[in-house]
Image (cartoon, helix red, strand yellow):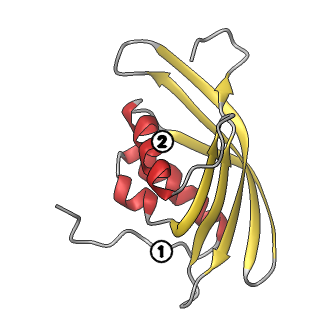
Amino acid sequence: MSDLIAPPAAGSPLEAVELVAVAVSDGDLEAAVAQYERDATLCPWAAADVPLQGIQRWLLELMDLRLPVEVSDCAVLGSRSVALVVAARRIRGTGPDGERVSLRGVGSTVVRRQRGGSWRIAADAWRLESSCDGTPR
């Protein structure tokens, strides 16, 4: 059953990236996927681009960690209709299996303005790797 309240629409390119992080942190797949265009692609880690169905599966894997996704050190370059958001992402804490998780990396996100003025992600590249602090993935 889907939520009775629609997921928020991003009012800016950066907000689209932040809304995905919040939705993944909250375990809300519908809200996370709502930030992507229907034909969006995602390149997680070193994998090849995956279509939206693959995006859903990959986001579910992140949600299974049950840890917050932090977005910081952002830069936005764009025009009125398309923007590139470069942001650091970080996931850290103790996963449901009791193992420490410490992933971080810089990602690039292409965001497009939609009819009505909201922004949605057209292409996303997450490059999360184990942190240098010796903590395993």
* Up/down of 100 relative to 15, above or below: above
* Up/down of 119 relative to 80, above or below: above
- Give the amino acid type for the residue marked by disc 2 in the picture: Trp
Picture coordinates of residue 51 (x, y %)? 54, 55
Looking at this view, name the residue that lies furthest to the bottom: 116
**Image quadrant where one finds the N terminus:** bottom left
Crowdedness near tag 1: few (<14), some (14–19) or many (≥20) residues, C-alpha within 10 Å: some
**Left or right relative to 89: residue 137:** left
Q: CA distance from mark 1 to mark 2?
A: 21 Å
Q: Residue at x 67, y 26 (%)?
A: 129
Image quadrant of residue 15? bottom right
Picture coordinates of residue 98 (x, y %)? 38, 12
Q: Nearer the viewer, mark 1 or mark 2?
A: 2
Q: Residue at x 66, y 35 (%)?
A: 45
**Left or right relative to 46: residue 29:** left
Which numbered dot is residue 58? 2
Crowdedness near tag 2: few (<14), some (14–19) or many (≥20) residues, C-alpha within 10 Å: some
Q: Residue at x 47, y 38 (%)?
A: 68
Helix, strand or loop at disc 1?
loop
* Up/down of 52 relative to 60, above or below: below
Q: Which of 22/81 is in front?
A: 81
Which numbered dot is residue 9? 1
Looking at this view, name the residue that lies furthest to the left: 1
Mark 2 or mark 1, which is nearer the start of the sequence?
1
- Give the amino acid type for the residue marked by disc 1 in the picture: Ala
Q: Residue at x 73, y 16 (%)?
A: 132
Q: Which of 54/76 is in front?
A: 54
Picture coordinates of residue 44 (x, y %)? 62, 41
